[in-house]
Image (cartoon, rainbow, N blue to C red):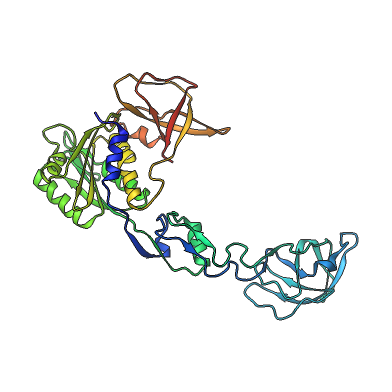
Amino acid sequence: MFSLDEVRDEILGALPAPVAALVPRAEAVGLALAEAIAADEPVPPFANTAMDGYALRAADTEGASDDTPVRLRMVGELAAGHAPTLPVGPGEAIRIMTGAPIPEGADAIVMVERTARDGDDAVLVRASAGVGDHVRGAGGDVAAGQEVFAAGTVLAPAHLGVLASLGVEQVRVFRRLRVGVMSTGDELREGPVALAPGQIRDSNRPMLLALVAEAGCLAVDLGIGHDDEAFVQRAIENAVATCDAVITSGGVSVGDYDVVKAVLDRMGALRWWQVAIKPAKPLAFARLRETPVFGLPGNPVSSHVSFELFARPALRKMMGHAACSRPTVDAVADAPLPRRPDGKTHFDRVRVRYEDGRYFVVRSGAQASNALAAMADADGLAILPDGDGCDTGDSLRVMLLR
């Protein structure tokens, strides 16, 4: 058997380089920048008020309080989206709304809650202001010429907001992958059809399509492949011609009907491993016309775990992500996680809770490789090295899934 690290390293070393593309800003969420982005202009472009209140000269409010308010002459009003037309002179104030530009002569804002109107043309200021109070300076968020985001930054919604504030409509990113997903097996059916003896509904393909999408890729449904080598080969050849990566489930073990492994071997590019892990021991991998093909095992939990350990890191690397794998943290066992020595690393499905700065885990249910309900209830995978497992209170490593 091969270790997890040597198999994963070989796969990651055989991948094509990320491909850069210029895409509309709205389509860039979740993608990694292929180049740094610098600001051509400041944000905000002008000094403005952070509060509804009155723009005034701080010196005019010296000593102001609830008991001894300062009376200032109100010379105008200014809403957001409008340019100032009047300056603020000594003893004067302008009623101003959040986001409006600071008028000439004003150097502070007193929030409206600390004031009271005195007739139509005056305001009573009940608090002393300091220079710069509630004033957002030009370039206070982003300065002109500043590098806003470094190359490799993965764009989240807030990043897109910053780019919009800079007027950036297109960004050069490592493009989103098209990833084809196919299940194999004559026993598979889909939808609410009646099942004949020996048939099951296909759960792997919907699950893997969702995992591919969650990894930030465009998932392409390739349907169900029959246990027929010619059929599977045509399906893989068509997928390789239109996708950046292909994922199959089933047909990669050592049985007579493991057609995916046989097809990839005949196509001349098969790497097949028995990996020293449980679940997800068998794994096939090929690179056809530069397109990686991942042959995952058919048991649902094995397929999910194999995707997390091998396919997801590879897909993320192909999209230029620096952090390719799920985060792994130290945790404490809330209950025993026993196992038997067998030369493998076990990945137990666990529920994770975070309390007082620590993670705690407990098994989410049955650990058989076909028990998908326990996988659905899991927040993480407990990493149990070869041995007898761990007892309540023991420390262990956990890969977080959510």
- The single residue placed furthest to the bottom in the displayed view is 85
Quadrant the C terminus occupies: top left
Towards the viewer: 216 or 8: 8
- The single residue placed furthest to the right in the displayed view is 68
Residue 214 appears at what percent x and percent y?
Answer: 37, 48
Is residue 380 shown left or right of residue 96? Answer: left
Q: How many marks?
A: 0
Is residue 216 shown left or right of residue 187? Answer: right
Is residue 33 shown left or right of residue 99? Answer: left
Above or below residue 85? Residue 269 is: above
Above or below residue 153? Residue 211 is: above
Above or below residue 169? Residue 230 is: above
Report the residue at 52% width, 34% height from top: 354
Residue 64 appears at what percent x and percent y?
Answer: 87, 62
Residue 253 appears at what percent x and percent y?
Answer: 18, 33
Quadrant the N terminus occupies: top left
Residue 122 appears at what percent x and percent y?
Answer: 83, 73
Report the residue at 69% width, 69% height from top: 97
